[in-house]
Image (spheres, grey):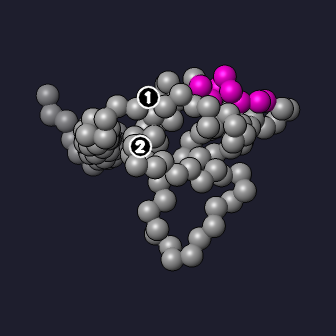
Amino acid sequence: MNEGGDIDKLGRGDIWAGQLPLCVNQNHVFAVRCGERLEPEFLSYLAESPYGKAYFLRAGKQSTNLASINKTQLRALPVLLPPMSEQTAIVERIDAVQRAVERYESQSEGLMRLKAGLLQDLLTGKTRVTP
């Protein structure tokens, strides 16, 4: 999880799944281990949620250009802890919604490109409009 930078980026993170054989994290990134009672994906979504963002905005310290949190503040994040089965169900539902959003955004981009092409054809006279 991110410890510093823009205030709205505090607590932002990603899940490490061993993508590289040898890797160390940068000193401005906290390595968080969730344990047996907390799904990493659930924690990630919680931190990104309005609930998590509000906590990091309150806990963060703002200097001239940078905001930061420390390990004590990160550990103090009040984690809502439903049963593992419910955490898994929540993660699966959020993942499904995100996949649907990505699909719709991709379709929308394609339609916008098609519209731009059609407008170009109409405005240049390549395609004629008959009354």
The answer to which of 8 and 112 lies nearer the viewer is: 8
Q: In this view, does 47 lie to the left or right of 2?
A: left
- Amino acid at pointer 2: Leu
Q: Which of marks 1 and 2 is nearer the N terminus?
A: 2
Q: In percent of the image, x 45 and y 34: which residue is there? A: 46
User: Residue at horizontal 46%, vertical 42%?
Assistant: 44
Residue 95: image location, x then y, percent: 30, 43
Name the spot of residue 92 as percent of width and height, x first: 26, 43
Crowding near the residue tagged with mark 2, few <14, some 14–19, many ≥20 C-alpha atoms within 10 Å: some
Is 73 inside the magenta-drawn segment?
no
Looking at the rendering, which quadrant does residue 96 occupy?
top left
Q: Is mark 2 on a helix, strand or loop?
A: loop
> From the image, which quarter does the C terminus lie in?
top left
Q: Residue at the far front: name it.
A: 36
Which residue, given by chain and number where applicable, does mark 1 sit on? 80
Q: Name the residue under label 2.
A: 38
Label 1 sits on what residue type?
Leu
